[in-house]
Image: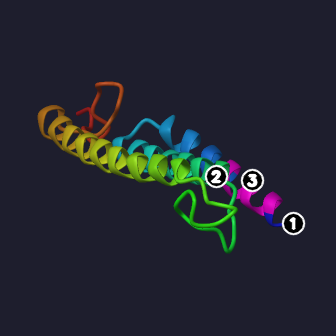
Amino acid sequence: MMIWLFAGLIGSLTAAGVYLTLRAQTFPVVLGLTLLSYAVNLFLFGMGRLNTNAAAVLGANATYTDPLPQALVLTAIVIAFAMTAFVIVLALFTRHTLGGDGVNGESSDRRDS
């Protein structure tokens, strides 16, 4: 039961992230990329299979926890934070330069008069 809930959560985050990424304004695109990074982090963490009562170091116990998915998630969190900060600064610069927040190069805030 818990596996289906976890898979549904990853699928929902991915679907919402793709939907928001395909929007025509910068804030939904940034939010969509953030949701996609959350989905990837959960996917990477789910690949590691949670072991209870297992040591984190080889040789300390008969069973051990694989540290690779945890290292991948930590690296993905850092990369996602840097990417989000860069995209926000780029969106603010584009909004200042073009006067709008449309991702197609046209401003959506200007009114034709």
**Secondary structure category for the residue under label 1:** loop
Task: Please state the horizontal and vertical placement of residue 73, each as a whole percent of the image.
Answer: 48, 51
Query: For this view, does 93 lie left or right of residue 46?
Result: left
**Secondary structure category for the residue under label 3:** helix
Quadrant location, the N terminus: bottom right
Q: Quadrant of residue 63?
A: bottom right
Q: Is residue 95 magenta?
A: no
Q: Quadrant of residue 98?
A: top left
Residue pointed to by mark 1: 1
The image shows a total of numbered marks equal to 3
Q: Who is closer to the viewer here, 16 or 64?
A: 64
Q: What residue is at 19 percent from the left and 44 percent from the top? A: 89
Residue pointed to by mark 2: 48
Q: Amino acid at mark 3?
A: Ala
| Mark 1, other Cα within 10 Å: few <14 / some 14–19 / many ≥20 | few
Q: Nearer the viewer, mark 2 or mark 1?
A: 2
Q: Who is closer to the viewer here, 78 or 98?
A: 78
Q: Amino acid at mark 2?
A: Gly
| Mark 2, other Cα within 10 Å: few <14 / some 14–19 / many ≥20 | some
Residue pointed to by mark 3: 7
What residue range appears in magenta? Answer: 3-11
